[in-house]
Image (tube, rainbow, N blue to C red):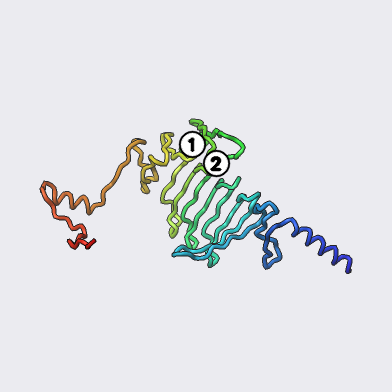
Protein backbone atom coordinates (compact mmCIF):
# COMPACT_ATOMS: atom_id res chain seq x y z
CA UNK A 1 0.00 0.00 0.00
CA UNK A 2 2.84 2.32 0.89
CA UNK A 3 4.57 1.52 -2.41
CA UNK A 4 1.39 2.36 -4.36
CA UNK A 5 1.07 5.70 -2.51
CA UNK A 6 4.71 6.59 -3.24
CA UNK A 7 4.23 5.68 -6.91
CA UNK A 8 1.09 7.85 -7.11
CA UNK A 9 2.90 10.82 -5.58
CA UNK A 10 5.80 10.34 -8.01
CA UNK A 11 3.45 10.36 -11.00
CA UNK A 12 1.64 13.47 -9.69
CA UNK A 13 4.86 15.38 -9.07
CA UNK A 14 6.22 14.32 -12.46
CA UNK A 15 3.01 15.45 -14.17
CA UNK A 16 2.98 18.85 -12.47
CA UNK A 17 6.68 19.25 -13.14
CA UNK A 18 6.06 19.97 -16.82
CA UNK A 19 4.09 23.14 -15.97
CA UNK A 20 5.58 26.48 -15.00
CA UNK A 21 2.27 27.65 -13.51
CA UNK A 22 -1.16 26.09 -13.00
CA UNK A 23 -4.20 26.11 -10.72
CA UNK A 24 -6.29 23.27 -9.30
CA UNK A 25 -10.08 23.47 -9.64
CA UNK A 26 -12.54 22.36 -6.94
CA UNK A 27 -12.91 19.13 -8.91
CA UNK A 28 -9.19 18.50 -8.85
CA UNK A 29 -8.60 19.43 -12.51
CA UNK A 30 -5.43 21.21 -13.55
CA UNK A 31 -6.39 24.58 -15.09
CA UNK A 32 -4.65 27.67 -16.45
CA UNK A 33 -1.52 25.74 -17.28
CA UNK A 34 1.60 27.51 -18.53
CA UNK A 35 4.34 25.28 -19.90
CA UNK A 36 8.04 25.70 -19.27
CA UNK A 37 8.40 27.94 -22.35
CA UNK A 38 5.72 30.32 -21.02
CA UNK A 39 2.88 29.25 -23.37
CA UNK A 40 -0.70 28.67 -22.25
CA UNK A 41 -1.85 25.08 -22.71
CA UNK A 42 -5.04 23.12 -22.10
CA UNK A 43 -8.23 24.23 -20.30
CA UNK A 44 -8.37 27.81 -19.08
CA UNK A 45 -10.78 29.97 -17.10
CA UNK A 46 -10.29 33.74 -17.40
CA UNK A 47 -11.94 35.99 -14.80
CA UNK A 48 -12.48 39.72 -15.44
CA UNK A 49 -13.93 41.94 -12.69
CA UNK A 50 -16.29 44.88 -13.18
CA UNK A 51 -14.27 47.93 -14.15
CA UNK A 52 -15.28 51.57 -14.75
CA UNK A 53 -18.87 50.75 -15.61
CA UNK A 54 -17.97 47.75 -17.80
CA UNK A 55 -19.51 44.51 -16.59
CA UNK A 56 -17.15 41.70 -15.70
CA UNK A 57 -17.28 38.17 -17.07
CA UNK A 58 -15.71 34.72 -17.01
CA UNK A 59 -14.43 33.04 -20.14
CA UNK A 60 -13.57 29.35 -20.49
CA UNK A 61 -12.00 27.29 -23.26
CA UNK A 62 -8.74 25.71 -24.45
CA UNK A 63 -5.34 27.04 -25.41
CA UNK A 64 -2.90 25.34 -27.74
CA UNK A 65 0.57 26.84 -27.76
CA UNK A 66 -0.69 30.17 -26.40
CA UNK A 67 -3.55 30.43 -28.92
CA UNK A 68 -7.28 29.96 -28.37
CA UNK A 69 -8.57 26.80 -30.02
CA UNK A 70 -12.05 25.31 -30.34
CA UNK A 71 -15.13 26.56 -28.52
CA UNK A 72 -14.89 29.35 -25.97
CA UNK A 73 -17.84 30.35 -23.78
CA UNK A 74 -18.30 33.64 -21.96
CA UNK A 75 -20.52 34.06 -18.89
CA UNK A 76 -21.64 37.01 -16.83
CA UNK A 77 -20.47 37.04 -13.22
CA UNK A 78 -24.00 35.93 -12.37
CA UNK A 79 -23.55 32.76 -14.46
CA UNK A 80 -25.57 33.72 -17.58
CA UNK A 81 -24.01 32.73 -20.91
CA UNK A 82 -23.49 35.89 -22.97
CA UNK A 83 -21.30 34.59 -25.82
CA UNK A 84 -20.04 31.44 -27.50
CA UNK A 85 -17.23 31.69 -30.04
CA UNK A 86 -15.08 29.27 -32.02
CA UNK A 87 -11.37 29.66 -32.70
CA UNK A 88 -8.69 28.19 -34.93
CA UNK A 89 -5.03 29.22 -34.99
CA UNK A 90 -5.94 31.73 -32.29
CA UNK A 91 -8.46 33.54 -34.52
CA UNK A 92 -12.25 33.49 -34.78
CA UNK A 93 -13.45 30.70 -37.04
CA UNK A 94 -16.98 29.45 -37.74
CA UNK A 95 -20.08 30.51 -35.84
CA UNK A 96 -20.18 32.98 -32.96
CA UNK A 97 -23.30 33.71 -30.91
CA UNK A 98 -24.02 36.61 -28.57
CA UNK A 99 -26.78 36.80 -25.96
CA UNK A 100 -28.34 39.41 -23.68
CA UNK A 101 -27.89 39.21 -19.91
CA UNK A 102 -31.42 37.79 -19.84
CA UNK A 103 -30.50 34.95 -22.19
CA UNK A 104 -32.05 36.29 -25.43
CA UNK A 105 -30.14 35.70 -28.68
CA UNK A 106 -28.80 38.98 -30.10
CA UNK A 107 -26.88 37.95 -33.19
CA UNK A 108 -24.99 35.15 -34.94
CA UNK A 109 -21.74 35.85 -36.72
CA UNK A 110 -19.73 33.74 -39.16
CA UNK A 111 -15.94 34.02 -39.35
CA UNK A 112 -13.08 32.43 -41.24
CA UNK A 113 -9.54 32.02 -39.97
CA UNK A 114 -6.74 31.53 -42.48
CA UNK A 115 -3.95 29.00 -42.05
CA UNK A 116 -0.86 31.02 -41.01
CA UNK A 117 1.27 28.74 -43.20
CA UNK A 118 -0.30 30.00 -46.44
CA UNK A 119 0.05 33.47 -48.01
CA UNK A 120 -3.18 33.44 -50.04
CA UNK A 121 -6.50 31.62 -49.97
CA UNK A 122 -9.12 31.14 -52.71
CA UNK A 123 -12.79 30.86 -51.78
CA UNK A 124 -15.95 30.44 -53.87
CA UNK A 125 -18.70 33.06 -53.99
CA UNK A 126 -22.15 31.46 -53.89
CA UNK A 127 -25.41 32.82 -55.22
CA UNK A 128 -27.36 34.21 -52.25
CA UNK A 129 -30.60 32.77 -53.63
CA UNK A 130 -29.04 29.41 -54.58
CA UNK A 131 -26.20 28.34 -52.29
CA UNK A 132 -25.37 25.39 -54.56
CA UNK A 133 -24.39 27.75 -57.39
CA UNK A 134 -20.89 29.23 -57.54
CA UNK A 135 -20.91 32.62 -59.28
CA UNK A 136 -17.31 33.73 -58.70
CA UNK A 137 -14.01 33.01 -56.96
CA UNK A 138 -12.13 35.37 -54.64
CA UNK A 139 -8.39 35.34 -53.90
CA UNK A 140 -7.54 36.81 -50.48
CA UNK A 141 -4.16 37.69 -49.02
CA UNK A 142 -3.48 36.32 -45.56
CA UNK A 143 -3.25 39.35 -43.24
CA UNK A 144 -3.16 37.23 -40.08
CA UNK A 145 -6.64 38.22 -38.89
CA UNK A 146 -10.07 36.59 -38.84
CA UNK A 147 -12.36 37.59 -41.72
CA UNK A 148 -16.14 37.96 -41.80
CA UNK A 149 -17.28 35.06 -43.95
CA UNK A 150 -20.77 33.64 -44.26
CA UNK A 151 -24.18 34.66 -42.95
CA UNK A 152 -24.63 37.19 -40.15
CA UNK A 153 -28.06 37.25 -38.52
CA UNK A 154 -29.49 39.86 -36.15
CA UNK A 155 -32.39 38.95 -33.84
CA UNK A 156 -35.00 40.62 -31.72
CA UNK A 157 -33.89 39.17 -28.33
CA UNK A 158 -37.41 39.32 -26.89
CA UNK A 159 -39.34 37.79 -29.78
CA UNK A 160 -36.57 35.63 -31.25
CA UNK A 161 -37.43 36.84 -34.76
CA UNK A 162 -34.87 37.81 -37.40
CA UNK A 163 -34.45 41.57 -37.81
CA UNK A 164 -31.76 41.64 -40.50
CA UNK A 165 -29.25 39.45 -42.30
CA UNK A 166 -25.95 40.05 -44.08
CA UNK A 167 -23.84 37.78 -46.27
CA UNK A 168 -20.06 38.22 -46.21
CA UNK A 169 -17.30 36.81 -48.40
CA UNK A 170 -13.88 37.28 -46.80
CA UNK A 171 -14.73 40.65 -45.19
CA UNK A 172 -16.76 41.88 -48.18
CA UNK A 173 -20.51 42.38 -47.93
CA UNK A 174 -22.26 40.49 -50.74
CA UNK A 175 -25.30 42.06 -52.40
CA UNK A 176 -28.14 40.19 -54.09
CA UNK A 177 -26.60 40.76 -57.52
CA UNK A 178 -23.27 39.27 -56.42
CA UNK A 179 -21.35 42.53 -55.99
CA UNK A 180 -18.91 42.94 -53.10
CA UNK A 181 -18.79 46.00 -50.86
CA UNK A 182 -15.87 46.78 -48.57
CA UNK A 183 -16.20 48.01 -44.98
CA UNK A 184 -15.74 51.66 -46.06
CA UNK A 185 -18.63 51.42 -48.53
CA UNK A 186 -21.25 49.53 -46.48
CA UNK A 187 -24.71 51.09 -46.49
CA UNK A 188 -27.17 51.03 -43.58
CA UNK A 189 -29.26 47.87 -43.40
CA UNK A 190 -32.90 48.14 -44.44
CA UNK A 191 -34.46 46.11 -41.62
CA UNK A 192 -37.79 45.75 -43.40
CA UNK A 193 -36.26 44.05 -46.42
CA UNK A 194 -33.01 42.83 -44.82
CA UNK A 195 -31.06 44.26 -47.76
CA UNK A 196 -28.05 46.54 -47.85
CA UNK A 197 -28.76 49.98 -49.28
CA UNK A 198 -25.92 50.14 -51.80
CA UNK A 199 -26.69 52.04 -55.00
CA UNK A 200 -23.03 52.88 -55.59
CA UNK A 201 -19.95 51.65 -53.80
CA UNK A 202 -18.16 54.99 -53.74
CA UNK A 203 -20.89 57.30 -52.42
CA UNK A 204 -22.27 57.48 -48.91
CA UNK A 205 -25.78 58.65 -48.11
CA UNK A 206 -26.21 60.82 -44.99
CA UNK A 207 -29.74 61.24 -43.68
CA UNK A 208 -30.43 64.37 -41.62
CA UNK A 209 -32.65 64.11 -38.52
CA UNK A 210 -36.22 65.32 -39.01
CA UNK A 211 -35.70 68.17 -36.54
CA UNK A 212 -32.90 69.61 -38.69
CA UNK A 213 -34.98 69.27 -41.87
CA UNK A 214 -37.88 71.14 -40.21
CA UNK A 215 -35.53 73.88 -38.99
CA UNK A 216 -33.99 74.37 -42.44
CA UNK A 217 -37.44 74.53 -44.04
CA UNK A 218 -38.70 77.08 -41.51
CA UNK A 219 -35.72 79.39 -41.96
CA UNK A 220 -35.27 78.92 -45.70
CA UNK A 221 -34.50 82.23 -47.44
CA UNK A 222 -33.60 84.16 -44.31
CA UNK A 223 -30.32 86.04 -44.56
CA UNK A 224 -29.45 85.91 -40.88
CA UNK A 225 -30.59 83.35 -38.38
CA UNK A 226 -29.96 83.74 -34.67
CA UNK A 227 -28.68 80.46 -33.38
CA UNK A 228 -28.20 79.56 -29.74
CA UNK A 229 -24.70 78.12 -29.52
CA UNK A 230 -24.24 78.00 -25.73
CA UNK A 231 -21.94 81.03 -25.59
CA UNK A 232 -22.58 83.16 -22.45
CA UNK A 233 -20.60 86.15 -23.69
CA UNK A 234 -18.22 86.00 -20.75
CA UNK A 235 -14.62 85.88 -21.88
CA UNK A 236 -12.31 84.37 -19.25
CA UNK A 237 -9.42 86.53 -18.13
CA UNK A 238 -5.97 85.28 -19.11
Residue placed at 49% from the left, 44% from the top?
151
In the image shown, does 39 or 61 lie closer to the viewer? Answer: 39
Q: Is residue 106 visible?
A: yes
User: In which quadrant of the rendered view does residue 46 lie?
Assistant: bottom right
Residue 14 vs residue 55: left or right? right
Q: Which residue is mark 1?
A: 130
Mark 1: give few (<14), some (14-19) or many (20+) Cα within 10 Å. few
Residue placed at 61% from the left, 60% from the top?
45
Residue at the extreme top of the image, as rendered: 136
The x, y position of residue 217, in whole percent, is 16, 49
Residue 173 vs residue 144: left or right? left
Q: Is residue 175 visible?
A: no
The x, y position of residue 141, in whole percent, is 52, 35
- Which corner quadrant holds the C terminus? bottom left
* Residue 159 numbered tag: none
Q: Which residue is mark 2?
A: 144
The x, y position of residue 36, in whole percent, is 70, 54
- Which corner quadrant holds the N terminus? bottom right
The x, y position of residue 130, in whole percent, is 49, 36
Label total for image: 2
In the image shown, does 156 or 111 lie closer to the viewer? Answer: 111
Residue placed at 85% from the left, 65% from the top?
6
Amino acid sequence: MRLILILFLFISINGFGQWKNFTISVKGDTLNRVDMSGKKQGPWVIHVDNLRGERGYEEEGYFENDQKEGTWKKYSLEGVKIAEENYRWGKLNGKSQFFTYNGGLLREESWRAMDPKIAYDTVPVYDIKDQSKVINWVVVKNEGVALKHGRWTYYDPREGTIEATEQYVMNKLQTDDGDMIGDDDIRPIDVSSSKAKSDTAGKKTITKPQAILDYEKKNSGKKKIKVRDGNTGNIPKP
